[in-house]
Structures are given as structure tokens and as C-alpha cells.
Amino acid sequence: MAKERKVVPQSQRQAAPKKQQADSKPFFDFSNVLTEHQDKIFHYAFIIVAVLIFIIRPLFSSHFGPSGDEITHKALGDLSYNYLTTFGKDDSLFRFDPTGGREDPALLQNYGPLLEVTSAAIYKNLGTNPYQTRHLILTLFTFLLFYYCGMAAYKIGGWRAGLIAMLFMLVSPRLFGEAFNNPKDPPFAAGYMMAIYGLLCLVSELPRPSWRTVILTMIGIGLAFSIRVGGLLLFPYTIMFVGLALLMNDEWREHLLKFDFAYYRPLIIQVAVIFAGAWFIGIMAWPAAWRAPFSQPFHALAVQSSYPTVISVLFDGKMIGSNEVPWNYNPFYIATTSPAIVIIGFFLGLALLPFMRKTFNGYFLFMVLFVSVFPLFYIIYKKAALLNGWRHSYFTYTGIAVFAAVTFEALFRIVKPKVWDYVLYGVLAIGILLPGTFIVKNFPVVYVYFNEFVGGVDGTYGDYHLDYYAASAKPAADWIAKNIPYDPNLKMVSNNPGELNQCFLMDKSKWHGEYVRYRERNEKDWDYAVFLPQFVDPEMMKHGHFAPKGTVYKVMVDNSVVAMVVKRVSKDDMIGIDALKKSDLQTALPHLEAAVKADDDNEIAWAYLGIAYASHGNKEKAIGAFNKSLSISPNYQLPQAYYNQVMQMR
């Protein structure tokens, strides 16, 4: 039987190193490549995994409620749909202000609503549930994220690298979770990666790329642009990557420096088609861009680059303004909330890069690294405002995952004898199974993931915002719908009622929650409550005081509470606080004392009990009550202020 031929992808044959002298020995030998049969097996495996991703993920899209921003973006989609279908007659979009004057309502006009309009067209005409429809569309669209990351790695390292990259993306819990209901960041990353793969193909086919590649690149750029105006970056990327490739080839550079337009006329026409087609795709469902098709995108880019909205974010155990985050904010999140195997592969690849570029197409490696690293450095340089987590930078992770996958392909080509192949497969399997197990175990609240470098979610609990998009509202609402019979006489509250109530509607439940701040929860009248960790004193979370007495259900991620359903055990705190505010100490004191007896971790009741004691002239008891309140919630300002006053009076 003839010996099986080994194959190397076309992109790698182009970049193969020059033949070495007979007495020269390379530092690393990358000759352990796949046979043709083995390459076909990985090709088939790639196809099977891609098909499974496309089919299975949509089946789970109904398990997700709306994300924190999605309610507003749904409204944007509805109004944009109305504007487009009436050809501009219904222009209520331009008077829409979801913040009640707190922010500039024109901010919403800077987002391309292609996916929102597509979803609105379906549920408005078919009568389907709006959020379930949106999540189905988002899930189908973000298939491109997984697929084109795999294809980009294949283009550089072959089908095994492609399969590894696709699996890396699949088990990245942050992107995997938000790809179901985050209407902007994972979809933008999907269009972005499609465009990058198109550019890899475009460069590999220079100076006469096929029209198939031209159309692919055009659609990728257009889709990214249609979702977030940051897609404009892909226009100069195209010029830069094509221009540098032409300058690196002697023949092409000669024609270029002679301004030989006849030679480059077909390429110029193709690039013009990419730009014109991508621009049209980007603005075709964007009402604000209809009014100003050329100036509006650049205005939107300027606004988004210096995002004016400032919120409080929890980082390293401290609440800071989103415009005051440290330089390492994004790098830290990427390094600690991505699978450890990807981060290890990325940095190992940087160390091996001088050797890898001699075997793989070095220019392709540069392209993949540039589209990931450059935006991160630019964000740091501009000191851009960053909201909770690193969701606005998800698109940069795509190149990191691709580069890490190619690094492992390089390792497979280096290791010898054969037994080390199996060791490397074992390392990959463990690295993929760890985050994969996390996804299965904690579904659907998976985007709160932290990796083993920082001890997982349990190791970072209380140091960083976890469920900022309120994904845990859906399992909490599902549990209530199944376990608490609806009673119109019972009152429910939540510190995230918007997301919770939409989840009730998705379940066709009659329950409805009213808003209450977590810190004011015991001052209000309610029978059941759903609390999420947003704006909760992180010290309460760290020391096990987040789930109060009366908690009947907890949404857990590993061993950490991210949401809870609470049945009120006593209303003495509410009665006592109300009486105290009316200066009725005789009523306030016994009720507040009863409240802390019913729940010793009720920091609010302890704080008001201290105020009642101080008002009654019992300073020692007041100090004891304030200390107890602060031992539960050290960042609680009310007892701290009164404690200082009482101490000054002693």
C-alpha cells in the first residue's frame, strides 16, 4: 500500500519557508502535518459541529429573557420598522426618549437597527412573542460568529485549526451566553469576523480576487456596519491590508508605484463595489442614516467613541464611574473571563510567533493579531468609557481565539513522537471541557463566567458585577410561575422589574413586579420579591448576607447567588420605619426590634433601630445597632452617618 500523502493548506504552502541548507537545523520542526485522510476527517468534523451549532442553539433561545439593554433596543426596532414601512411618515422614532430626559434621546439614533427591524417585521406580522422572536433571530445570526472564526483559523492552519477555533468560541461562556439576547455586541462580532475572513480570502487571491470573495467581504463589512457604527473600521482595514499586501510583492509594488491604473482597474472596481455595497447594507434599515446617508454614520462614530453615558461599575471590589476605569480594565476581563485554554494558547503563540510565521502565512497572522490587539490599545489610548464587563470589546476576542487555535495547530506539528499528540489532545480536551461544563451546569446564566486563573465565579464574587444584564431574571420568573400560585392580593417587587416582567409575559404568567431599590426594600410593602445583585453592597455578597431570611429560591452560579426569590417573613420593619419617619417612637421601637429578631441580617432594620434608639436618647444601644448594620453592610451610608453624629455627641 502506498504511503499516505501529507497535505498542507494552500495558504500555508504560499508562506512556506525557503529551503534550508543541508547543514542547517531549524529550532522547531513543523513537519508533523496531517495526512490527506486525517485532514478530511477534521474537515468532516468541522462541518458536523457547525451544523449542530446551527440547529441546536436556536432550540435553547427561549430559555433567555431580555437583556438589560434589549427592552430599549426592541422599542428602537419597533419605531424604526414603523418609519421604514411608512417611508418616513411615522417619524415618532426621532421623538423617542426612553430615559425621561436623563440622557440625550438622540443616542439611540446612532445604532444601526437591522436585526431589530428584521425581528419586528416577523413578530408584528406573525404575532409571535417579540423577545422569543428576537432571540431566535439573534441566535441564527450569531452562528456566523462561530462559523467564521473557524473558517479564519482554517484559512491559516487547516481544518484541525478551524475545528479548534470554532470549539474555542463555542465554549467561551461570555460570548456564548450573550449571543442569545445581547442585540449588539455578539452580532457585531459575528459580522466583524465574517468580514475578516473575507479579507483573508481577498488578500490570498490578489491581485485578481474572485467576485465570490468580493461579495463575501462586502456582506461581512455591511452586516457589522449595520449593527454598530464601529464597523466603519473595516473600511480602512480593507485599504490597509490590501495595500500592504501589494507593497510586499515585487511585481505588484512596481505596478502600484507606477500608478498603473490599467493593471489595477479590476481590483479598484472590486474594492469600490465592496465599499458601496457595504455602505448600502449598513444604512438600509437605519432611519437616521436615511436622512443623512453620509454624515450620520461619522457623527454616530464620534458619539460612540466618546460615549457620554456614565454609570457606576464594580471593579476590583470598588464602585467607580464607567469613565474612570483603569487602563487594564479590558485586558483584565479578557484574561479572566475567557477560557484559560484560549488565553494560554494566545500568549504561547506570541512566544512562538517568530517560528510560526515561517510555517504559516505570516501576513495572515499579522492580520488576525492586528484586528484584535489594535482596537484594545486604541481603547486604552483614548481612555474610553467602558460599561459593565467587556461586552463592547467582544469583537476583539475573535482574533484572539483564532490565533490561539493556530498556536495549538503549530504545537501539533512540532511535537514528536506520536504519544505527544495524544497528550496535546488531552490538554485541549480538558481546556475545552472546563468552560463547557460550566455552560451546561449554569445554563442559561453563563455569561457571568470567570476562569480558573482567578478562582472562578466563587473566587471573584463581590468584586465584579456579575449579572449586569439580568439573565437570572428568567429562571427566577420560571420558578415563580411553576411554584407560586398567582394571587392578585399579593404584591411582588424587584430591583430589576423590567426584565422580570417581560419574562413573566414570556411565561404567560399574571405576576407583575414593581420597582424597589435593594437598599430600600424593607421600607416598601410587598409579599414576594426577586432580587438580583445589581447595586448591592459587594461586602454583603462576599460575606454571605445577600440572600436574606425568607429566601425560598436561589439562582446559583457554582456556589454563588445571582438571584433570589424572597417571601417576606415580617413587615415589622416597614411599619417601624414608617412610624419612625412620623416621629412615632412608641410604635417604631417595638416593631423594629421585632424586625431584627425575625431577621438578624436585616441591615436596614438595624440602621433604623439605631436611629430610633438615638432619638430615644439611648446612645449605647444606638451605637450597637449601627455597628451591627455596618457589620452586615460596611458601605451602607445611612448608619455610618448617624453613627458619626452619635459619636460626636458623646
Image (spheres, rainbow, N blue to C red):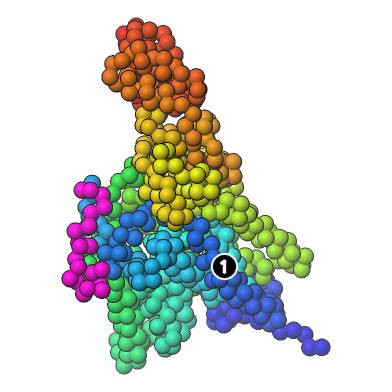
Type of amino acid at the residue the image marks with label 1: Ile
Residue located at (36% from left, 31% from top): 524
At 47% from the left edge and 61% from the top edge, which residue is drawn?
180
Residue 62, position as x, y percentages in the image: 49, 60
Quarter occupied by the C terminus: top left
Residue 94: say if magenta.
Answer: yes
Which corner quadrant of the image does residue 613 belong to? top left
Q: Main secondary structure of the magenta part?
A: loop
Whole-percent x, y for residue 259 in the image = 29, 86
Find out whether residue 493 is within the magenta segment.
Answer: no
For the point 36% across and 37% down, the residue is 516
Q: Which residue is mark 1?
A: 56
- Of 166 and 197, the residue lying toward us: 166
Where disc 1 sits, the SS reads: helix
Image-based side of 234 in relation to 396, left or right: left
| Magenta span of residues | 82-101
Residue 20 x, y percent position in the rendering: 63, 77
